[in-house]
Image (tube, coloured by chain):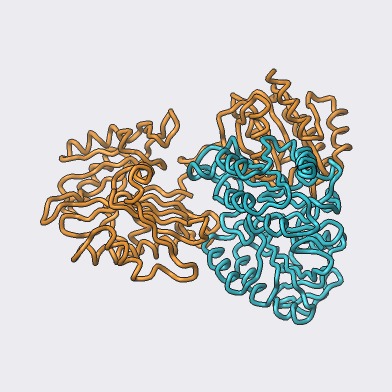
Chain colours: A cyan, B orange
Amino acid sequence: MAVLVGKNSRIIVQGFTGKEGSFHAGQMIEYGSNVVGGVTPGKGGMTHLERPVFNTVSEAVKETNANVSIIFVPPRFAADAIMEAADAGIETIICISEGIPVRDMIVAKNFLDEKGARLVGPNCPGVITPGEAKVGIMPGFIHRPGRIGIVSRSGTLTYEAVDQVTKAGMGQSTCIGIGGDPIIGTTTRDAVQLLMEDPDTDGIVMIGEIGGTMEADAAYWIKENATKPVVGFIAGQTAPKGRTMGHAGAIVGGAEDTAEAKMAIMRECGIHVVESPAVIGETMVAALKAFAEA
Amino acid sequence: MNLHEYQAKETLNSYGVPIQRGKVASTVEEAVEQAKALQEETGTSWMIVKAQIHAGGRGKGGGVKLAKSMDELKEHASNILGMHLITPQTSAEGKLVRKILIAEDMYYPGDSEPKEFYMSILMDRSKGCNAIIYSTEGGMDIEQVAEETPHLVHKEWVQPGASLMPYQARKIAFNLGLSGTAFKNMVKVVSKLYHAYEQSDASLVEINPLLKTSDDKIVAVDSKMSLDNSALFRHKDLAEMRDIHEEDPTEVEAGEYGLNYVKLDGNVGCMVNGAGLAMATMDIIKLSGGSPANFLDVGGKASAETVEAGFRLILQDPNVKAILVNIFGGIVRCDRVANGVVEAYKNMGDQIKVPIIVRLQGTNAEIAKKIIDESGLKVESAILLKEAAQKVQAIFS
């Protein structure tokens, strides 16, 4: 497997019997992901999508030996669901829910750090290792198994990058949608590090956006630790200051978190920065070639 | 969501934070009545008239005035109410003032000199916890203070899962150079302020100035407060304080359709599914020689209704010279979106007088392109993002 999810993932779905949970669990199963069951409090003992439903995550873990959970519960209950998964010993928690109150996420993130669980998201499209496991809401068919890792704060913009990489004749090792909220579990740097240390990944596409300092942190780490080429893009070069652009975390606060400032730091750190998101695929081809010749 | 100064003060005061007392008025007559009531209640002789709009720097634009008599109060109230207040944070047209706050004078003489401080609380994204930022240099532009005298701006982080501890409140009060009664009062105010921030799910509380009065009270003389929209379900009372007059009418309308729209000042409208791709599309417009007229995220379901609503929103802006629709169809199929675009166009064809470029990529993209091309409408289609960029460029060359 590449990173985070793969053939050995035993996946449960929190919010399994809800509309979103049912639809996407069905899509994941169709893709071939190993969904072993789900959790909906009060519906334990039922069978849904030919899989067992449990009342609690700890019961689900005990019965199915699950190690990955994907969360589709409404935002007001989502931080609690994240903490329940961590407490039950789930290693990788992927939270799709959008609109979790910041106060709840501060508490949940601190709890996760204590439990040693990894969270991806919230407000993210999930994680996919093409051909092995899709744990998210992304369209499976645009992906091809391959050796390019993708990290992104966005949903459809990630699909755009994936599609360009596929059309350029390459495939993806693992694509990690880290989410667009101000507080997220796995940062850009964390995700880049996972892919940098992954023997199945040859190159990394890193897509960021305005707001926060995650891309700069990742860039400084890359400068010291890169063993493979990184192509980067920052969305929001034309976004005005002080306005939230869709994602709760996409807001320019000061001079350091503009797209321009982030791109400058990324360039200094040796990342192949593209100004247009239309040339991500071809830039990766060129970067790999240059890296092989160097 | 942002609150007005008077709303923020009421909210903070409900958590025990001492505030400069005041009363709100929306007409000159009401202002006089409220001023009399305020004088009776507080014993203040001088009063401050403060325009209530969602923008900082109100004093610089003439929106904050001292009244030393009832005649002066009347004069200031009639000047400020109804004015288009222009501040460094508003547009060039300014913002219409619909309400004023008449506030008591806190700078009365006494045993010691009054002293202004700065204090704000917000979430520090890089640390994933809340931070209190404070300075001895109150009443000034804090960004300027931070730039010119960074050593005078202090920061205190609050451990996630814990609250602000007493030692932290004491440290803040010491760093502000206080002693005696003023010190004790500051310790109390800092704790209450943090409690108010946390309990109301605020994303920002900013008090500038936070005043030490001549009799050693600590009082919030101004206050700015923003709330976490995602947590408003817990605060029905605060949610009701929303003032849609302060928001862009097109953005309010978009919200009613479940669309996320931000007005910009460019000439190419855009409609996109997903926030990241929407920002990237704006960037592409710029690189192609245009400039984005808006941010518009139609979300997961790009149906005929949402597409039509999107077209109507974009076309309200007379500066729009072209529209770029950029949809990456994953779960939502491109052929459905294409049919939606055609239907929307037919419904409002006579109102559309600018070129439209539709880029559909993903599930059934080829079928979608065919639907657009064979519709007979004046809509250009594209599949690759690059093609869409070239088509925008062609309009401006």
Q: Nearer the viewer, residue B220 or B98?
A: B220
Indicate whether B27 appears above or below B198: above
Seen as rendered, the residue at the extreme front is A294
Question: How far from the left and from the top, in percent, is residue B279?
Answer: 64, 40
Task: Evaluate whether residue B91 shows in this view.
Answer: yes
Q: Position of residue A245 (x, y in %)?
A: 59, 44
Residue B397, given in percent of the width and then of the height, sits at 69, 17
State the image quarter where residue B12 is shown. bottom left
Direction top: furthest residue:
B397
Q: Nearer the viewer, residue A85 or B293?
A: A85
Residue A235 falls in image quadrant: top right
Residue B246 shown left or right of residue B169 in the figure: right
Which image quadrant: the N terminus of chain A? bottom right
Question: Where B84 sits versus B106, above or below?
Answer: above
The one nearer the camera, B74 or A259, is A259
Which quarter of the rendering shows the C terminus of chain A?
top right
Q: State the residue at coordinates (67%, 65%).
A: A73
Question: Quick one: which residue is furthest to the left in this view?
Answer: B111
Q: How many marks?
A: 0
Residue appearing at x 19%, y 40% in the figure: B67
- Report whether residue B337 is seen: no
Front one among B311 and B129: B129
Residue A265: where, in percent of width, then height? Answer: 58, 43
